[in-house]
Structure formats: structure tokens, C-alpha cells
Image (spheres, helix red, strand yellow):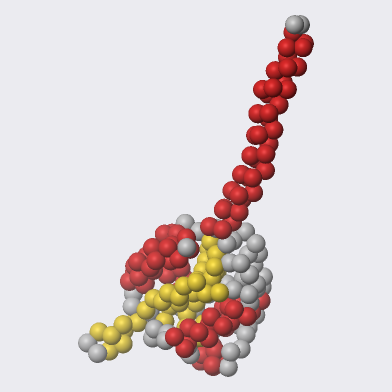
Amino acid sequence: MNKRKAASIMWRCVVAPVFIMVCIGALYVQPACALEDTAVKTLIVYYSRTGNTKTACEALQKELGCDILEIRDLKSRAGGWGFFTAALGSMFNTHTEIDPDHIDLAPYGAVVIGSPVWAGRPAASIRTFIAKHRFDGRKVIMFTTTNVFENKGSQSRTEKMVVQSGGRVAGYFQVAATEKINGEKTVRSRELIAQDAVKLASEIETVLKQ
């Protein structure tokens, strides 16, 4: 048997089958890996008026190791009047102009939405963000800072907004911005707010993995 014929037989019997198996395996493995990467990638989107929500979300981001993006309200909410108009807008469920106006959620399988709570609802900029985006096929987690913990009725209003944008709230987590000391309501320090966010990180991570 000459060398050329022997090489041809080896190709047909040994090399070719192995090559075909490797190619078929690649077709199945590569898309599965890509899907897995997308499913676990998380984005924290937040708005913060006073800095409390910013502190909490940044602490949470460090624990989860995910991406984070701040939304700005293009209407001034500074001072007492700014807070009054913000709370009034929440009562009537109004929207506002935000920056960025649109966020590409395609790379993410989960979105954590951080917001202060005004009049039992998320801030206007967050309501606007929810209304402008689609959450189809993504886990949505609400993460709020609040003076008074939201009851189920308040949470359900927010969850309804998410549903209208094609999503479902998989978890709802809250951090207190104030506390009572000797019977008086006191603003909590940023350090305590950050600590509470860190404590919630493991629970949020569990929800993301479910």
C-alpha cells in the first residue's frame, strides 16, 4: 500500500469523523454559552435626588459586580420646591424628560431599578424609564430607598408599570432612608444605607440566579 492511499484511508476512518464531531459540538456549545452569558448579565439603572439611592445602588453594584447607569431628571428637583413638584407629580403619575432617553437593554438578562419613593411611587424619572423601555424576557428587580416602607398596594402599582412594559418584578427590596431615634424621625447616614444595601445583595443575587 503506497503512502498516498494509506493517508487517504486514515483521513476517511480517523481524522474526518473526529473533525465532523468537533464541528457539530461547536454548533451546540457556542450558542448555549452565549445564551448563558446574556442571562446572568445584570444592569442597575437608578435615579437619585439626594444621593441616598446613589449610595445604595453603588454599594449593591460592588457586591454584585454588575454594570450600573444613572438616570438624570432634566427637570430640576432641587430644594423644597423641587421636592414638592416631584411628590405632586408622583401623586398624578406624571412623567418627565430624562437623560439618557433610551438605554440599550439587549445585552442584559436582568435589570435592577433603583429609585427613591415619592407619594408611594417611584420617582418620575424612573416611571419615565419604565414607560420608555421593554423588559420582555428579562428579570426586573425593584430596589428603593424610602422614608416609609412600601406596602403591598404601593408595590403592586409599580409592578403594574413593569408589566405594561412587558416585564415582571421578580423581587422587591427596600432600604430605609430614615429611622426613629428616641421617638423622632432621623435621617440615616450614607454609611448605614450602604450597609443595608450590602446586606440585601445576597438575597438579590439569589433571585437573579433562580
Which quadrant of the structure image shows residue 88? bottom right
Task: Write the residue at 58% across / 67% down.
Answer: 138
Residue 126 lies, in percent from the top left, at 56, 78
Q: Residue 31 versus residue 117: which sits nearer the camera?
A: 31
Q: Residue 44 versus residue 204: which sits nearer the camera?
A: 204
Quadrant containing the N terminus in the rendered view? top right
- Residue 170 vertical placement versus 16 (above, below): below
Q: Residue 150 versus residue 36: which sits nearer the camera?
A: 36
Task: Write the residue at 63% across / 80% down.
Answer: 164
How many marks do you count on the picture? 0
Task: Write the residue at 60% across / 49% down.
Answer: 32
Residue 61 visible (yes or no): no
Residue at the outermost left position: 182
Lateral position of residue 28 relative to residue 58, left or right: right
Residue 83 lies, in percent from the top left, at 50, 88
Lateral position of residue 90 relative to residue 177, left or right: right
Task: Write the residue at 44% across / 85% down.
Answer: 152
Residue at the outermost top position: 1
Residue 11 visible (yes or no): yes
Residue 111 lies, in percent from the top left, at 55, 67
Residue 139 lies, in percent from the top left, at 54, 68
- Residue 88 vertical placement versus 201 (above, below): below
